[in-house]
Image (cartoon, helix red, strand yellow):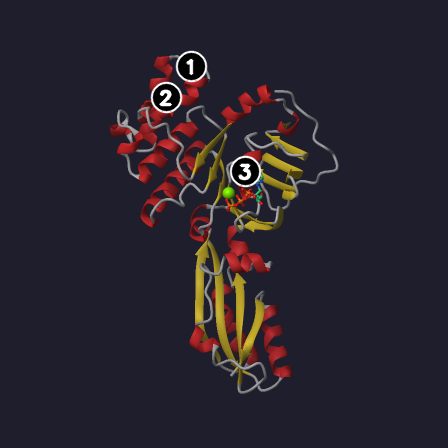
Amino acid sequence: MTQHVFPAALEPAPGTSGSEIVRLASVTRRFGPTLALDDVSLAVAEGEILAIIGRSGAGKSTLIRCLNGLERPDAGHILIEGADIAALAERELQPLRRRVGMIFQHFNLLANRTVRENVALPLKIAGEGRRARDARAAELLELVGLSAKADSYPAQLSGGQKQRVGIARALAARPKILLSDEATSALDPETTQQILELLRRINRELGLTVVLITHEMEVVRTVADRVAVIEAGRIVEEGPVWRVFANPRQALTRSLLATVRPQLPRHIAERLSPVPGRAVVLRADVAGPGAGRLAADAEAALGRPVELLHGGIDHIQGQAVGSLFLEIGARNEGEVERITSVLAARGAEVEVLGHV
Ligand SMILES: Nc1ncnc2c1ncn2[C@@H]1O[C@H](COP(=O)(O)OP(=O)(O)OP(=O)(O)O)[C@@H](O)[C@H]1O
Ligand SMILES: [Mg+2]
């Protein structure tokens, strides 16, 4: 593969550490009038698990398909290990496809081939001999816990087992990057957890970089290191999972994460008034080592009781992430302002929800 010079104007992506294995720079992809990707810039660090989330039609699959050359951008650069694949001709993409494996929602296994043959298929296409193929397939089936099913056909497997075969096949050519488009959305929650554990283990043991698309926020929470949010072809928010879960900046992100972040119980929300009364009810989002002390610290600083109505401290990627719904005595706007500034001074993002 030819090395293409990286445009000097592009800054390193914020929030990535370690060496960069993938970079999209100002990538645009149109389908007729639809702008599926609109000036997308994104970097992936080697060995990380990046989740891409967004609503249906946002451009997630198009983005991930650009990373293995299944989709060609109309403009921009796609650098895989420093080489610009957007500039490659179709036949030059073959070596790339070996460095980038992919797994799918509906597994995409060949029904008339055994599990062993499915796993070995990429090697057969690459022209490897029978012996080497069988040895590699056996090794991979061992890795994904399916050695006993080598001679079975896909129809004889459960959904979770089929996806294990899909993962083994994706790893056959020893890729550095694994792409996953909704790989667990056809599976039940328990099987999903097992597949996620397998992906996590592969990520750790083989040092594989993983880029995954999911509609399941619990998947993001349990396996991803970083998350990027895409809306109408644009990346609107990205960061470490704990940071984005602690403090989503975009309305879309808050809405996507609503099921995995604490929400004010409805019977309390229904009691709230927009005008000051006896007390203010607010949401305080706080992350990091001081998160667990926020309510006590605020109580000391304010000299009045701080009541925890709902929420608490979660732990994501080893970080304390607090979403606290607090009720604090406040009779007018001035008192509310003092309370919010005391909380903000301790690192909290504060949203006044109403008054009681
Ligand atoms: N081959 C194609 N021809 C025409 N339009 C396409 C094609 N592929 C994607 N699109 C359009 O591009 C936009 C982005 O599609 P994409 O499949 O990337 O969305 P997505 O985020 O993966 O959605 P979903 O969550 O439903 O899978 C959509 O408006 C889609 O209709
Ligand atoms: Mg899609």
Image location of residue 210, percent across then percent down? 49, 38
Q: Tag 2's secondary structure?
A: helix
In this view, the mark in front (3 or 1): 3
Note whether ligand 1 is within 8 Å of mark 3. yes
Determine whether, in the image, residue 87 is placed left or right of residue 222. Answer: right
Q: Cα distance, mark 3 to mark 1?
A: 27 Å
Q: Which residue is mark 1?
A: 128
Q: Nearer the viewer, residue 48 or 274?
A: 274
Q: Are marks 2 and 1 in contact (CB under 8 Å)?
A: yes
Q: Amino acid at mark 3?
A: Ile
Which mark is drawn over residue 64?
3
Image location of residue 154, percent across then percent down? 31, 31
Q: Residue at x 29, y 33 (%)?
A: 155
Determine whether, in the image, residue 43 is placed left or right of residue 156. Answer: right
Note whether ligand 2 is within 8 Å of mark 1. no
Q: Residue at x 64, y 20 (%)?
A: 2
Q: Which badge, 3 or 2, is on the more N-terminal residue?
A: 3
Image location of residue 242, percent across then percent down? 51, 54
Q: Which residue is mark 2?
A: 136
Q: Residue at x 41, y 34 (%)?
A: 205
With respect to residue 180, does 335 lie above or below? Answer: below
Q: Which badge, 2 or 1, is on the more N-terminal residue?
A: 1
With respect to residue 296, does 223 lie above or below? Answer: above
Q: Which badge, 3 or 1, is on the more N-terminal residue?
A: 3
Within 10 Å of disc 1 (Cα), the crowding (few <14, some 14-19, many 20+) is few
Question: Dividing the picture into quarters, in which one does residue 41 lie?
Answer: top right
Q: Amino acid at mark 2?
A: Arg
